Image (cartoon, grey):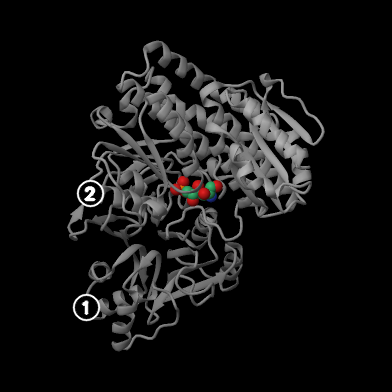
Amino acid sequence: MCGIVGAAASRDVVPFLVDGLKRLEYRGYDSAGIAVVAGEDVRRVRRTGRVSELEAAAAAEGLHAPLGIGHTRWATHGGVTESNAHPHISVGELALVHNGIIENHEQQRQRLQALGYAFESQTDTEVVAHLIHHYRAQGASLLGALQRAVKELHGAYALAVIDRRDPGVLVAARMGCPLLVGLGEGENFVASDVSAIVSATRRVIYLEEGDTAQVTRDAVQVYDAGDAPVVREVHVSDVSLASLELGPYRHFMQKEIHEQPRALGDTLEGIVDAGGFDPALFGKDAAEVLADVESVQILACGTSYYAGLVARYWIEAIAGLPCAVDIASEYRYRPVAATARQLVVTISQSGETLDTLEALKYAGSLGLVRTLAICNVPESAIPRASRLVFYTRAGAEIGVASTKAFTTQLVALFALTCVLARLRGRIDAAQEAAYLDELRHLPGSVQHALNLEPQIALWAEQFAPRQHALFLGRGMHYPIALEGALKLKEISYIHAEGYPAGELKHGPLALVDEQMPVVVIAPNDALLEKVKSNIQEVRARGGQMYVFADADSHFGPSEQVQVIRTPRHVGTLSPIVHAIPVQLLAYHVALARGTDVDKPRNLAKSVTVE
Ligand code: AGP
């Protein structure tokens, strides 16, 4: 959702801010703006729509300055208008950008109005600008005013502020929303996401909850929640500029689908290097935390939730542990019968999804302290709030539709299953070696599935004019049917539903006619014959079947039934391989329909609000 970038330098930072905002576009936004301190003035440009429009406006207005802040906004409080776009300016003196939500903005607004402040927007953010201005007017420094103001805010924020009276100073604060400081050569930065500043530096300090910071071009000083100066660790981010570029691809989603053999290989590296399913893969004290676990509770949203649904089959079958999987936004509001020795696993590509973070906190409030995060973004909020962490190594995922994050999450969850199984004596060394071997072959099998792209693109032409589609799967491939339906609806806007194939005659069969394409995931596993019967049920009602069948299943095409042969059945890891064709199908249908593949309407990459 919203994104922040700021810079203090000796060069003109406007091109850098615009470039940073472009790199934040993937998160989803509906307006953007930048403000700079130029000479003795604060100047600002804001636009609804794309950053490219903002760029043109900034050029037209001749905006140049060595200090500035920029923002992409995804509207929550107040509509998509220029006056609601950030930065917000108080009394022509200070400009501020904000990610998050200020819950007590109404009370603050009334108080500040009584003090004479005039409001120009309907946002919750504008109160923060005036509050800081108010404390400056009482004699506080810019940093001091920020530190006083944030203590009166309830809610979540990442803030960056500049003031025309302090031409070289940028101040920042973080609570509940990510914010980092970038350390450059003779210039320093703030950003909500490392991708915004990676063209200048990969050396970053992740601010902690309650931290504030003063950033000039020569110095950075961080303060803790008690306003005491503090030294925070400097990290070198492994996000590269190349990973943020499209290269030869048309869309990031296409690039990310094709990166999966590499992403899986990188994620597997630690596991294979460890020579087995060592609990230490999940953190230093993982052996102790996982040793006496009696059940597993998985919490996640969207695609990450579907990864959890696949994992349930593995955890129950291989580790022999009861496993529940909940949508985070449901779990966080329901009375839960918590059992003490339960492992709570959160899955999140971004590590920022508010519902997942809040569900994790709720689990903590119930006394569930064995927590593990599976995440793709280092130092993001969810892993920071968890005792154990596994970082998938998918690399930056820019397309809103999650692809490589999903398959690497599945690898992490499979490794977790095997660690739990080993700790419980459910697998012996030979079985462990066999699973490791399956993992080693996984990138190759995924590459085979990617090679199906030309055939899938032909199917996509037939899908493109449709309004609805059904996806069917059974057992651990049922979540892949759900994922296929989500991918299709998300980027092509075709209404799609995923169903366990056995549920067909309990309702969805009524939808089937010659206009309804039905995609079937048909791996060569113990349920294949059942799936074949389900296919006959659809065929008898005139439905058009599109079957992804393993090469060794001898599943042939027939009237109304088209078949694409996926690689030979890979056993337990089969859902990972079967995820690839449904991703490709969604991508090519979206392409044929001409939608905005990487930035589908109404969606954001990181969902940091409820
Ligand atoms: C997937 O294609 C989606 N864009 C979405 O469902 C996503 O998986 C969900 O919002 C969860 O995000 P997270 O993994 O970053 O927590």
Residue situated furthest right in the rendering: 559
Whether 9 is drawn above or below 90: the answer is: above
Q: Position of residue 26 (x, y in %)?
A: 54, 53
Q: Position of residue 274 (x, y in %)?
A: 37, 20
| Amino acid identity at mark 2 | Val
To which quarter of the image does residue 577 belong?
Answer: top right
Q: Earlier in the sequence, mark 1 or mark 2?
A: 1
To which quarter of the image does residue 275 belong?
Answer: top left
Q: Residues within 10 Å of mark 1 (few under 14, many from 20)?
A: few
Residue at 25% of width from left, 43% of height from top? 368
Q: Is residue 200 in sight in this rendering?
A: no
Kindly identify which residue carries mark 1: 139
Distance between mark 1 and mark 2 Cα atoms: 27 Å
Q: Position of residue 210 (x, y in %)?
A: 25, 58
| Amino acid identity at mark 1 | Gly
Q: Which mark is residue 157?
A: none
Q: In the figure, is residue 12 to the left or right of 48? A: left
Q: Position of residue 481 (x, y in %)?
A: 59, 39
Q: In the figure, is residue 48 to the left or right of 280? A: right
Residue situated furthest front in the rendering: 506
Residue at 32% of width from left, 65% of height from top? 155
